[in-house]
Image (cartoon, helix red, strand yellow):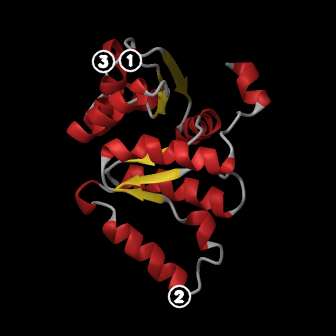
Amino acid sequence: MEAGRNFGRALAENNLRLVYGGGTKGVMGAVAAGVLSAGGHVTGIIPEFLVDMEATRHSLGQLNELMITKDMHERKHAMFERSDAFVTLPGGIGTLEEIVEIMTWGQLGRHAKPMVFANVNDFWKPMLELIDHMSASGFIHTAHLVRPLVIDRIEDIVPAIKSRWAETGAPEGDPATISKL
């Protein structure tokens, strides 16, 4: 939870907005609270069926922008379109599913946005070992497109993303998406 709040504050202090799954509980809620407490901008994207499970309607009202989608697929697509980088803090099966999908889209050439595993207390070590194993076994032919940045310290995440943007060019955003904002 502390790592989530600290990451949120780092985003706000660097004038980076948070686009996230809309939950106001757990680590997701801690990140959003960190951004908001530091005066940053938060966009929550949540499917209708999760509103009362992962959040409260009152807490969702604290966000700068809220988008309620009909299902998880629409949520993930909207998050993808509005995000310039993907940071995965420790989490459960839903967190794992979402980052694997983003990695898959990277491997398929659908994006070149930075992907980060916030490896707090080596949380993602087994996942990283699995990715290495899949690659060594010949199942990942474009490992360089799948490999995320692995950052152990929360305070190093934003500088690492900015450094990647400096190398590859900061994303300017899809004009069709921007026109909808």
Q: Quadrant of residue 170?
A: top right
Mark 3 sits on what residue? Answer: 37
Marks 2 and 3 close (CB-CB < 8 Å)? no
Tell me which amino acid carries mark 1: Leu
Q: CA distance from mark 1 to mark 2?
A: 44 Å
CA gap, disc 3 and disc 1: 15 Å
Q: Quadrant of residue 8?
A: top left
Of the two numbered discs 2 and 3 in the rendering, the one whose residue sits closer to the viewer: 3
Please state the total of marks drawn on the protein image.
3
Q: Earlier in the sequence, mark 1 or mark 2?
A: 1
Q: Earlier in the sequence, mark 3 or mark 1?
A: 3
Q: Is residue 93 left or right of residue 87?
A: left
Q: Is residue 71 visible?
A: yes
**Residue ID at (54%, 80%):** 135
Q: Is residue 1 visible?
A: no
The C terminus appears in which quarter of the rendering?
top right
> Which amino acid lies under the numbered mark 3 shown in the image of this protein?
Ser
* Quarter of the rendering occupied by the N terminus: top left
Q: Position of residue 163 (x, y in %)?
A: 54, 47
Q: In this rendering, is residue 88 above or below 4? A: below
Name the residue beneath numbered marker 1: 60
Residue on which the image places disc 2? 137
Circle 1: element type = helix
**Dots 1 and 2: beta carbons under 8 Å?**
no
Residue 96, compared with residue 68, is above or below; it is below
Q: As drawn, is 113 to the left or to the right of 94?
A: right
Ranked by sequence position, the earlier of labels 2 and 3 is: 3
